[in-house]
Amino acid sequence: MAAQPKVEARPRKWLIPITLVLLEEESSHGYELMERMVEEFGFEQIHPGSVYRTLRQMERQGLCQSEWDTSSAKGGPARRMYSITGAGEAYLEAWAQAWKQYQQLMDEFTRVYRGPPRSSG
């Protein structure tokens, strides 16, 4: 019996648009973003290093901005508070439009794949 091939059929690079959609709802700290990714999007594992690298990359690209939040409860350390920028909102809108096209492609694939059996002759 042949082994089942391992196929990953989900788009890559979800972290930027998901982070932006969360920041569009409200400004957040990195740790809060990770918690929301798990709760709202069902991520099983989030590597903090990946999230913080992505946030720094997004900031360099002008998609988000951050400032130090020194109002932490119980006198804890200052944390960076991230918020979406106008460029981030434009990126998110373009990504959503591209996703709609991709979703239509996947819907058509599913329709054809699960369509009526074809005659063989």
Image (cartoon, rainbow, N blue to C red):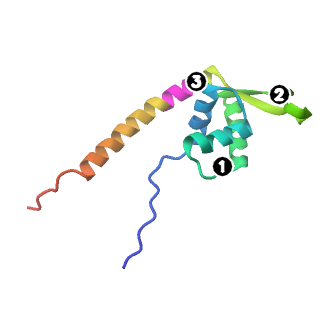
1 relative to 71 in the view: left or right:
left
Q: Is residue 68 above or below residue 30?
A: above
Element at label 2: strand
* First in residue order: circle 1 vs circle 2: 1
Q: Amino acid under label 1?
A: Ile
Q: Which mark is residue 69?
A: 2
- The residue tagged 3 is 89
Q: Residue furthest front?
A: 74
* First in residue order: circle 3 vs circle 1: 1
Residue 16 in percent (x, y) is at: 60, 37
* First in residue order: circle 2 vs circle 3: 2
Nearer to the camera, 99 or 42: 42
| Residue located at (8% from left, 61% from top) | 121
- Dominant SS in magenta: helix
Residue 53 in percent (x, y) is at: 71, 43
| Residue located at (72% from left, 26% from top) | 65
Residue 113 in percent (x, y) is at: 27, 52
